[in-house]
Amino acid sequence: MPNIKSAIKRVKVSQTKTLNNTARKSALKTAIRKCKEGIAKKEPTAAEALTEAIKALDKAAAKNLLHKNAAARKKSRLTKALAAVK
């Protein structure tokens, strides 16, 4: 544990941010997984799941959890997979 006051604060802030980022990444992965499962099972709700996944990817890219190009690539692949099923 650091002795300097500002360093102590940085440790606390980084722990808080790590928890928030972990929760956000988990929610993102869940949204993507639900979309992939819906596409694989050819469910009628797959389009709604895709919309939620795209929304989650856009938010993650805006919060710098994902690179914007990585988010765009994932959105493209999910959209392409849904189109192939229809």
Image (tube, grey):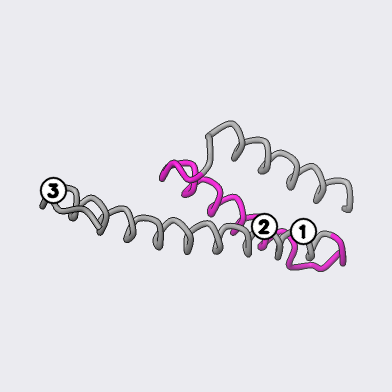
Magenta extent: 40-65
Q: Amino acid at mark 3?
A: Ser
Q: Position of residue 55 (x, y in %)?
A: 54, 52
**Dot label at residue 32:** 2
Q: Nearer the viewer, residue 75 or 86?
A: 75
Query: To which residue does mark 3 refer?
Result: 6
Which residue sits furthest top? Answer: 69
Q: Amino acid at mark 1?
A: Lys
Q: Is residue 46 magenta?
A: yes
Query: To which residue does mark 1 refer?
Result: 36
Q: Is residue 85 magenta?
A: no
Residue contact between numbered discs 1 and 2, judged by CB atoms under 8 Å: yes
Q: Amino acid at mark 2?
A: Ile
Q: Give the side of residue 75 with respect to residue 83, left or right.
A: left
Q: Residue at x 53, y 57 (%)?
A: 25
Q: Secondary structure at mark 2?
A: helix
How far apart are labels 1 and 3 at the CA level? 44 Å
How far apart are labels 2 and 3 at the CA level? 38 Å
Q: Nearer the viewer, residue 19 or 1?
A: 1
Residue contact between numbered discs 2 and 3, judged by CB atoms under 8 Å: no
